[in-house]
Amino acid sequence: MLDPRETERRNPRTAAIDLATPLEIVDLINAEDRTVAEIVGTQREAIARAMSLAEESFRAGGRLIYVGAGTSGRLGVLDASEIPPTFGAPSELVQGVIAGGLPALTRSQEGAEDVEGDGAAAMDERAVGRSDFVIGIAASGTTPWVRSALLRAREKGARTGILACSPPPDDVLQMVDVAILPIVGPEVVTGSTRMKAGTATKLVLNTITTGAMIRLGKTYGNLMVDLQATNAKLRDRSERILMVVCGLGRDEARALLERAGKRVKTAIVMHKLDASREEAERTIEKGGGVIRRVIPEPPPPVE
């Protein structure tokens, strides 16, 4: 195919896929997908570095901003959109910016990734600064829009990273603080980066944000405690967490949750320290948001 990018190589294992039966196609795709998690694991140190940079940005009042085009951009927007309901975080804390804007989320805007200046403009529009961490997502490693966004973010003093499934050019590597490169190899269908590259990208983004949220104290053990009971499902989950952690009945858990302003983390500290809501919130703040810094004991073991 005369293209050096990993994402543009032909996969010899699927060269005859057009003659395969449905079951054979499933097996071929599944065999390729099984390699992805292991390859992502080779990037463990870089992913951990990105997690630490995200945490540092959050604690400094900054943001994590993903920038990408096509599938890469959509995955960034998806990961960012799931942080507020999962962890009770402000919607602006993690942001996804996609080339072509909102229309590109549901309809392909393929030419948008080539308009290099628009990437820089997107960083200007969001007033990216020294407290922010900007991660460029580019499966091929060469997207002009992403390169432009990273360069402008760097100029503005932000920390930067690149997530790519093909080795990026040297000039891109020189403008980032961390490079995460899960090289998953050629796709089942040549160039279709919505497949293995997309899966690898989602795994990496999930790990970065989940880890950073854990580091901020959004969990108690592995329980999701920094959530607000804003609908029936979340009220039920919140009450069940309090029943397990505090050893309460359903009615007692519901009453405690109400006194805590429907915040599970606050309710746990109120109960454990026999404190008022205001006292509990001050204590949590002094502990950097991490329950285990103010209540050393772990949650009850899993039965």
Image (spheres, grey):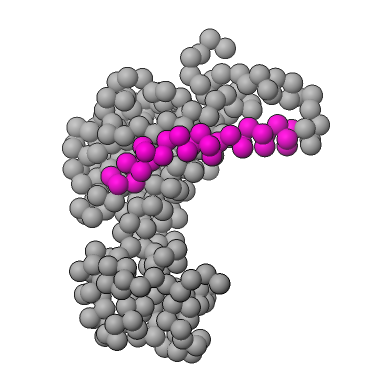
**Is 131 placed left or right of 299 in the picture?**
left
Locate residue 121, reporting x and y percent.
28, 35
Locate residue 30, reporting x and y percent.
67, 37
Check if residue 44 falls in the magenta segment. yes
Give whichever of 127, 293 is nearer the camera: 293
Locate residue 280, reporting x and y percent.
26, 78
Residue occupying image coordinates x 79% and y 24%: 19
**Is 30 placed left or right of 87 in the picture?**
right
Asked if residue 234 can be seen in this view, the reply is no
Find the magenta span and give its range: 25-53
Give whichever of 123, 254 is nearer the camera: 254
Locate residue 64, reporting x and y percent.
31, 47
Quadrant placement of the C terminus: bottom right
Residue occupying image coordinates x 32% and y 41%: 49
| SS assignment for the magenta stretch, majority | helix
* Position of 261 relative to 171 (above/below): below
Asked if residue 144 can be seen in this view, the reply is yes
Work out which residue is located at the far top of the displayed protein and give it.
Answer: 2
Quadrant placement of the N terminus: top right
Residue 117: name its quadrant. Answer: top left
Residue occupying image coordinates x 23% and y 81%: 278
Check if residue 76 falls in the magenta segment. no
